[in-house]
Amino acid sequence: DGGITQSPKYLFRKEGQNVTLSCEQNLNHDAMYWYRQDPGQGLRLIYYSQIVNDFQKGDIAEGYSVSREKKESFPLTVTSAQKNPTAFYLCASSIALQAGGQTQYFGPGTRLLVL
Amino acid sequence: AQSVTQLDSQVPVFEEAPVELRCNYSSSVSVYLFWYVQYPNQGLQLLLKYLSGSTLVKGINGFEAEFNKSQTSFHLRKPSVHISDTAEYFCAVRGNAGNMLTFGGGTRLMVKP
C-alpha cells in the first residue's frame, strides 16, 4: 500500500526545545515538501527537496531545518528559534518536475502544540 | 509570481442542493490548477486537476471544475451535496516554470440537513 506517513500525529514542544517531525514515502517520488497550516489559512511552504542531498528554502523557512539523506525520508526539525510553532504540519511528495511532476500528494499531518 | 483567491471563506448549503466554490488566480505564465479537500485533522486529498486539454475537469466524489482562462478562474461545482462533503476545500496553482504550489486560503463547505 503506497503512500506518505507522518509521525507523530500529535507532538508537544517545551520552551527552548527542538523537535523533529517525521515524513516517509514509499511512492518512489523524487521531490518532497513541507507545509505549515494555520487555522483559517492556506498552506505555506517551509522547505522542499527535488532530489536526495539537496533542499531549498520555501516562503517561511526561518526557525526550521531539514535533511534529505534518503529518497524516502524528509524529516523537519522545528528549532527553538521558531517562536510561534503551534500549527498543523503537512508533508507532500511528487515525481520529478522533468518527469511531469505537477501533482503533489499529501500525508495525514502532524499537529504541533507548545506546552 | 502567482496568487490564488478563494472568494468565500465559508459556504453553508443544505443537503442535496448544488454548490459552487469560487477560485480565481493570477499568473503571468501558463498554469496547472488543482482542488484539494481536507477533512478535520487530516491531510489534503486531491479532488481534481487541470493540466491541459478539456477545460471541464471531473474529479472524485461527483465534483467537477471548469478552467476559464479569460476569467482566470477555476470554480468547483457539485450538483447535489451530501453531509459527508462537509470539509475544507483548497484551490492551488502551479506555474509551468517550477514545481511549487500556491494555495488559496480555503473555503469551508458546511452541508446542513
Image (cartoon, rainbow, N blue to C red):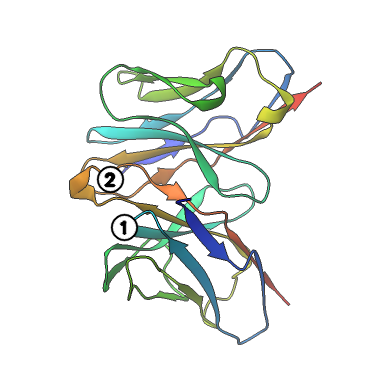
The image quarter in which residue B21 lies: top right
Residue A51: x %, y % from top left = 25, 64
- In terms of depth relative to the viewer, which is nearer, A104 or B77? A104
B63 vs B28: above or below: above
Residue B69: x %, y % from top left = 30, 21
Amino acid type, mark 1: Ala
Whichever of callouts 2 and 1 sits on the residue coming sooner in the sequence is: 1
Chain for disc number 2: A
Q: Is residue B30 left or right of residue B9?
A: left
- In terms of depth relative to the viewer, which is nearer, B91 or A23? A23
Outermost residue on the front side: it is A1
Outermost residue on the right side: it is B113
Q: Quadrant of the C terminus of chain B?
A: top right
Kindly indicate whether the residue at mark 1 contacts the one at mark 2 (C-beta within 8 angstroms).
Answer: yes
Q: Residue A101, which numbered label?
A: 2
Q: Report, in whole angstroms, how far the alpha carbon at label 2 lies from the one at label 1.
A: 8 Å
